[in-house]
Image: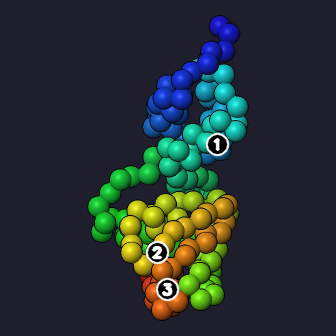
Amino acid sequence: MPPKELSKEQRQKRIQDIIARESISTQGELVERLRAEGAHVTQATVSRDINELRLVRLPVGKGRHRYALAQMAGHADVEEELGRLFQNFVQDVDRGENMLVIRTAEGHASGVALLLDRLRRDDIVGTLAGEDTIFVVARSTAEGEELMEEFHALMLG
């Protein structure tokens, strides 16, 4: 059966189905699974889909991770999960005026940034995440100081 082009919606639905039933830990594994199902995909396309679907990598033990749909949860649940992620994966928080830099374990910056964004806090203008670094812009220097104290407290638990 030759590979077929799927619409973006079909492809993203298939990705959601795959990660719901299987433990997929890398983009490469996801590309392989989609191709095995007859879909014509590139890693770049799958990478964009992962970002658009806001998938997160959850720890499954022994240094392994799996992709999962980020849970849309209540504010208290988001804060609880953020605390767990800070304790497990945040290594350092630094600040310059109203800008903060959060260093995480490799591959965890986007998951932490997603939860910070979900809080929809007025004192956070926005976040930008890479593989292991999150750039957080606070509304003011004073709010940056308060956020830094809060983030340090989250790291300690």
Does label 1 or label 2 sit earlier along the sequence? 1
Looking at the image, which residue is at 59% across and 65% down? 128
Going by the numbered disc 3, the residue's amino acid type is: Ser
Q: Mark 2 — residue? A: 124
Q: Mark 1 — residue? A: 47
Q: Mark 3 — residue? A: 140
Q: CA distance from mark 1 to mark 2?
A: 26 Å
Q: Secondary structure at mark 3?
A: loop
Where in the figure is residue 68, as x and y percent of width and height?
A: 49, 47
| Total residue callouts | 3
Q: Nearer the viewer, mark 1 or mark 3?
A: 3
Q: Is residue 47 above or below residue 135?
A: above
For this view, does 64 lie left or right of residue 42?
left
Does label 3 or label 2 sit earlier along the sequence? 2
Mark 3 Cα-neighbour bin, 10 Å: few <14, some 14–19, many ≥20: some
Q: Secondary structure at mark 2?
A: strand
Q: Secondary structure at mark 1?
A: helix
For this view, does 135 lie left or right of residue 85?
right
Where in the figure is residue 40, as x and y percent of width and height?
A: 66, 22
In the rendered image, is residue 44 in sight? Answer: yes
